[in-house]
Image (cartoon, rainbow, N blue to C red):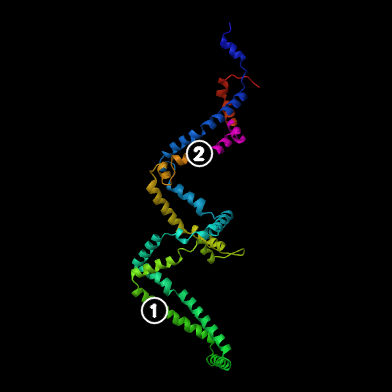
Amino acid sequence: MQTSKDNQNLDMPALTIDGLIEAQVAFMQQWLRMQAEPLSMQAWQWFAAQPLNKYVSADNLQQLINDWLLNKPMTDVIRKDIRDILHTIIYHPVNDNVPLSELVDDTQVETLANYVGSHDQQRNILIHTLVGNETFADLLTQTLYHAINDFMESTLDKAGAAGKLMKFGRSSFEKATNRNLDEKLQTYLHRNIKDLAHKAEANAQAHLTNEEVARLLVTGWGRIKEKPISEIQTYLRDEPNDSSIKHIENSIQQSYNRLRLSPYLHSLVAAGVDTWYTNHQADSMANIAASLHIDEQAITQLSTALLPVVTDALESSWVTAHITDMLQAFYAQPSIKAGLVFGSD
């Protein structure tokens, strides 16, 4: 005699393995969509509790830095992005209305000025840069030479007969000495201005007090701090074939390429990685993340932001195909097939 349970079984359609797999795939996708957010938090909580040295060694970090950063040059795409971003930032209209003091606080300048003024070596370097620098002396020599030459030329042209006589005297001097007067004048100015610059530097280093040096720096800052940030643009060129930003980026890139392949930098990076790893190898991932201001709240925000991506991935054809292949492989096992009875297609 048939029971009510037997009647129910008769009413149910026969399941095939393919039908069961299809139902399971749909169920798994729906379940994962519903559980994606709590699962991500649970995964983070588990991962955060693990110590760094359980999964990562100093050699792993070193290899990552070498393979991903040092052994490969920047791509042209990244370099173009750097140039475009620098151009956008430097030439942004907001720079016209923001003073330099927005970038550097007065107290920072005062602290730096007092530091430089109170340390003899830094103070002397600053004085040498401002007063005794040979490049500055060369520039001053050229400036004075051109000023004197322009004055002489304009004066001689207006002096009539006297001017002609002076020009004749100049020509006679050059023939007699076999020296160009312009060259002689530049040599004289260069020698004497350099000597004066060295004397001025020695005098400044001997007599400028720490307070005076600090005050000079603060005063200099006071003269420029209210100028707009866009003032920097006056020192740059922005022509299609002569871009200062491109030159700067090229220079940085050349330095980077030279350094990243040098044994010197590799030695410093290796030493830095070893120091950091020694300090943090026993720390949990949560503690390391916390040093970067990454906590559960940040992970929650990140998982919420990524939820649409996870949902779309779960519903994608490639995920469906992989789950289906996995289940088919499971039911194809002889031990599973022998223990189950399904209808056949």
- Between residues 230 and 126, which one lies in front from this camera angle? 230
Quadrant, the C terminus: top right
Answer whether residue 298 is visible to the viewer in this image: yes
Circles 1 and 2, Cβ within 8 Å, touching? The answer is no
Q: Residues within 10 Å of mark 1 (few under 14, many from 20)?
A: some
Q: Position of residue 193 (x, y in %)?
A: 45, 80
Mark 2 lies on residue: 303
Q: Tell me where the magenta segment starts and ends, as one range.
A: 303-323
- Type of secondary structure dominating the magenta stretch: helix
Q: Residue at x 56, y 93 (%)?
A: 162
Q: Is residue 302 above or below residue 139?
A: above
User: Who comes first in sequence, dot 1 or dot 2?
Assistant: 1
Dot 2 falls on a residue whose secondary structure is helix
Disc marking residue 199: 1
Q: Quadrant of residue 73?
A: bottom right
Residue 160 vertical position relative to residue 260 in the rendered view, above or below: below
Q: Identify the residue at the far top of this view.
A: 1
